[in-house]
Image (tube, helix red, strand yellow):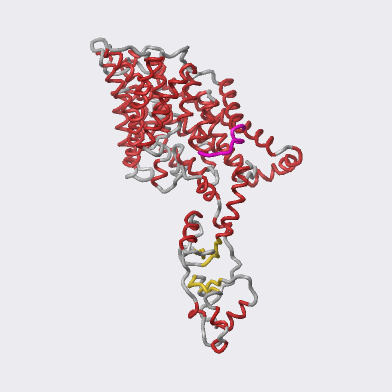
């Protein structure tokens, strides 16, 4: 059923709403509904993934386990590619990046296919052990729920953007049972900038999703019970921030290197599946910790049972003989997680870097602490550094320090570590941003020319539709018209620019009243002088889809108040006026401030 058909069915209810429910209350009600729907989607994915993984692994004997774990992800990627090809027309749009683009450049219009495509493909990929997280697909699904709810209800761009953010926040909140982190994730990574009034609907949506998740799914990702932190460990917190910063830079650059590597096979090329599947299977065969999201490994670290990390690997027979073996395995698992995730996504699977950042960060924190403790110079609490490593790496990789602080505090119960969390995440974020100005989500968009971190002026201009600013009441003239005919047109119009258009509609030039003022008094040449002799080339021509910042730059450069708008083939469409852009910009600014 189309959006318009649904809107017709809802029209009586919408009319009643306008009469009886205030705008603010209406948006709060919608944020609750979006939060509940996103929460249900998160529960569905979490439950189905765990059920599927249990089914796949229940019948495997221990000697064959390492072989099965290396084959399953290849099957998952293949099934995901098949589903994408036959049910989605080859278009999946993985990760948070497309949602950021939809929000920044397309009026928060998220394709309807993302209501189900992310859930299904993430379920297939992660259930079969693809080395990626489910957080990004859930957040994208939530954003799609919010966006499409706004489209069905014919909400304007501003309110649709709010619901898109509510859905994204609710998805993260539900999957971790962390409402504050969900809100901050939406603000720091997707909405990027919003009025303060937006926070209330975002909080309500996240809280609703968390309630739904807690009611239907009892699992809490991680648990840490701690009451204090040692003051003398502060220098090590700073060092950990530095360590996770450089590790975050490595993860961002590695992820995009592999993304570029797999782009050599555009579309659904089976060579990608073959090459990527073989590489991923080999990595998991050597390091089973890379299988799936890897949260079970993080739980081992948090519970103080790090020695069991090697249990399922081919190196388990050596674990008692060499105390450094565990550290080496942790180091390789830490460094190769981003490789495994990049291969999973690049070769056709679906998942995100959010969960992979948490896993790799936990490994990094443990590696850092264990290395210092093995030196026997000083002893630091390893469990604390596991948690702090997760926060520092997440802050660096997705450029969201507040999300990292509150997420780790909420999901581990580690509020007593707030000060260390602030030290590690802020230093990691600032150093990472110095070397990598864009996050793992936005780096590719930026290379494609989409500056999602543009200032407020650019953001507002990007929300304006150039086609709606087109002025089409300029009278067109033909090149073979006489000066006398042109003067007659002058008498009946208020405009002082006239586009000269060929018979096929192509713009040839312009005639301005100021430039032909002297000729107007030369009535002897009214019949002999033609428009083609009077016309001049326009100072610049803009396209109907050119962004308005570029148009304003051209207007200023040529000291013009209007420029013609033409299609690529030169067909004249109308004029765009600087005054119209600035007037519409001002209205948009007022709307944003009253949001």
Q: Residue at x 74, y 43 (%)?
A: 15
Q: Residue at x 35, y 16 (%)?
A: 61
As drawn, the residue found furthest toward the bottom would be 524
Q: In which quarter of the image is the C terminus?
A: top right
Quarter of the image holding residue 91?
top left
Which residues fall within the magenta stretch?
192-200
Residue 317: tell me if it is visible: no
Any magenta on residue 199? Answer: yes
- Tell whether 36 sits left or right of 226: right
Quarter of the image holding residue 143?
top right
In the rendered image, the vertical position of residue 329 relative to residue 544, given as above or below: above
Please name whichever residue, 460 or 63, is drawn nearer the observer in this view of the structure: 460
Residue 415: tell me if it is visible: yes
Question: Residue 374: horizontal and vertical position, in percent?
Answer: 28, 13
Question: Residue 369: horizontal and vertical position, in percent?
Answer: 33, 17
As drawn, the residue found furthest toward the left would be 321
Give the number of callouts: 0
As drawn, the residue found furthest toward the top would be 320
Question: Residue 315: horizontal and vertical position, in percent?
Answer: 26, 17
């Amino acid at each position: 059923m189309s959006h318009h058909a649904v809107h017709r069915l809802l029209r009586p209810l919408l009319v009643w709403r306008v009469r009886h429910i205030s705008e603010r209350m209406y948006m709060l009600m919608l944020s609750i509904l979006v939060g509940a729907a996103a929460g249900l989607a998160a529960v569905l994915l979490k439950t189905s993934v765990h059920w599927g993984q249990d089914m796949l692994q229940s019948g495997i004997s221990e000697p064959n386990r390492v072989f099965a774990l290396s084959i399953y992800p290849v099957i998952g990627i293949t099934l995901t590619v098949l589903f994408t090809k036959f049910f989605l027309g080859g278009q999946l749009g993985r990760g948070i990046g497309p949602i950021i683009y939809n929000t920044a450049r397309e009026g928060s219009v998220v394709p309807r296919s993302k209501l189900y495509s992310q859930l299904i493909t993430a379920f297939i990929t992660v259930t079969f052990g693809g080395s990626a997280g489910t957080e990004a697909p859930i957040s994208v699904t939530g954003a799609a729920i919010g966006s499409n709810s706004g489209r069905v209800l014919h909400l304007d761009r501003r309110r649709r953007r709010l619901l898109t953010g509510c859905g994204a926040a609710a998805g993260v909140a539900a999957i971790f049972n962390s409402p504050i982190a969900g809100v901050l994730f939406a603000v720091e990574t997707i909405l990027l900038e919003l009025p303060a009034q937006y926070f209330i609907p975002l909080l309500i949506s996240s809280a609703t999703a968390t309630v739904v998740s807690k009611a239907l799914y009892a699992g809490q990702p991680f648990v840490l019970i701690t009451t204090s932190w040692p003051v003398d460990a502060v220098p090590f917190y700073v060092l950990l921030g530095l360590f996770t910063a450089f590790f975050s830079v490595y993860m961002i650059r590695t992820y995009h290197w592999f993304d570029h590597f797999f782009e050599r096979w555009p579309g659904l090329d089976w060579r990608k599946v073959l090459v990527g599947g073989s590489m991923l299977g080999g990595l998991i065969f050597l390091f089973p910790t890379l299988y799936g999201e890897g949260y079970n490994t993080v739980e081992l670290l948090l519970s103080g049972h790090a020695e069991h990390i090697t249990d399922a690997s081919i190196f388990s027979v050596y674990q008692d003989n060499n105390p450094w073996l565990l550290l080496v395995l942790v180091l390789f698992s830490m460094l190769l997680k981003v490789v495994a995730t990049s291969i999973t996504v690049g070769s056709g699977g679906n998942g995100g870097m959010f969960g992979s950042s948490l896993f790799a960060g936990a490994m990094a924190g443990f590696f850092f602490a264990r290395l210092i403790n093995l030196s026997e110079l000083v002893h630091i609490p390893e469990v604390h550094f596991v948690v702090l490593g997760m926060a520092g790496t997440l802050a660096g990789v997705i450029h969201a320090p507040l999300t990292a602080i509150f997420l780790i505090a909420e999901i581990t119960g580690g509020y007593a570590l707030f000060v260390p969390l602030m030290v590690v995440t802020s230093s990691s974020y600032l150093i990472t941003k110095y070397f990598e100005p864009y996050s793992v989500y936005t780096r590719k968009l930026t290379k494609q020319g989409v500056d999602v971190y543009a200032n407020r002026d650019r953001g507002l201009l990007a929300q304006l539709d150039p086609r709606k600013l087109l002025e089409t009441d300029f009278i067109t003239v033909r090149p073979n018209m006489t000066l006398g005919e042109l003067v007659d047109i002058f008498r009946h119009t208020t405009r002082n620019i006239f586009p000269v258009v060929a018979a096929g509609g192509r713009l040839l030039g312009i005639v301005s009243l100021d430039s032909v003022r002297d000729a107007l008094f030369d009535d002897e040449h009214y019949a002999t002088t033609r428009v083609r002799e009077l016309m001049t080339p326009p100072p610049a021509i803009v396209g109907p889809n050119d962004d308005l910042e570029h148009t304003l730059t051209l207007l200023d450069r040529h000291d013009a108040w209007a420029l013609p708008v033409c299609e690529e083939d030169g067909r004249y469409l109308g004029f765009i006026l600087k005054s119209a852009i600035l007037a519409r910009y001002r209205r948009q600014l007022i709307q944003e401030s009253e949001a």
